[in-house]
Amino acid sequence: MRILRFIFWFALTLAVAAFSARNWSPVTLALWGDWVMDTVLPVPILLAFLLGLLPYLILHRATRWALRRKLHQTERQLTEMRALAPSAEADIASSGTIPPSAAPIAVPPGVS
């Protein structure tokens, strides 16, 4: 799985590098009022991409955090329940008898 992740990030890096190399032209951005920014084209494109990615990245991290917290809480409750509840196998082994509801029922041949 790591090799697939590496191949994906490597291909993405190559694509961004190729795009940047082919579109390396100066642009002038008029910001607020009299502010002007002279830069190359890949910089504002990358900034716009990261600005659009940020809210979804925050949402993803918050969801993962909440789900992990729920999972740990559930695992903790399960561990406590297992520690508090006596096991049925230990009861059977200690008493030596099988409860009536667990006894096998013998059915004679030919009867269904």
Image (cartoon, rainbow, N blue to C red):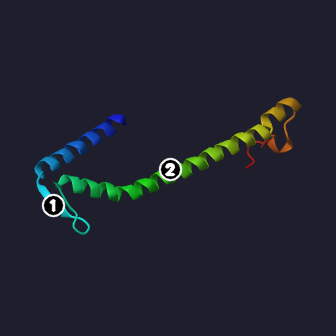
For the question of whether residue 38 can be seen, the reply is yes
Q: Position of residue 76 (x, y in %)?
A: 67, 42
Q: In the current view of this chain or complex, which residue is farthest to the bottom? A: 33
Name the mark nearer the viewer: 2 or 1: 1
Q: Residue at x 83, y 34 (%)?
A: 92
> Residue 64 has which mark?
2
Residue 98: horizontal and vertical position, in percent? 84, 37
Give me the residue at 80% from left, 38% from top.
86
Left/right placement of residue 11 relative to residue 96 reads: left
Secondary element under disc 2, as helix, strand or loop, is helix
Q: Amino acid at mark 1?
A: Thr
Name the kind of residue labelled 2 in the image: Arg
Q: Is residue 77 left or right of residue 88?
A: left
Quarter where residue 91 is shown: top right
Question: Which mark sits nearer the N-terminus, 2 or 1?
Answer: 1
The residue carrying mark 1 is 28
Residues marked 2 and 1 touching at CB (< 8 Å)? no
Q: CA distance from mark 2 to mark 1?
A: 40 Å
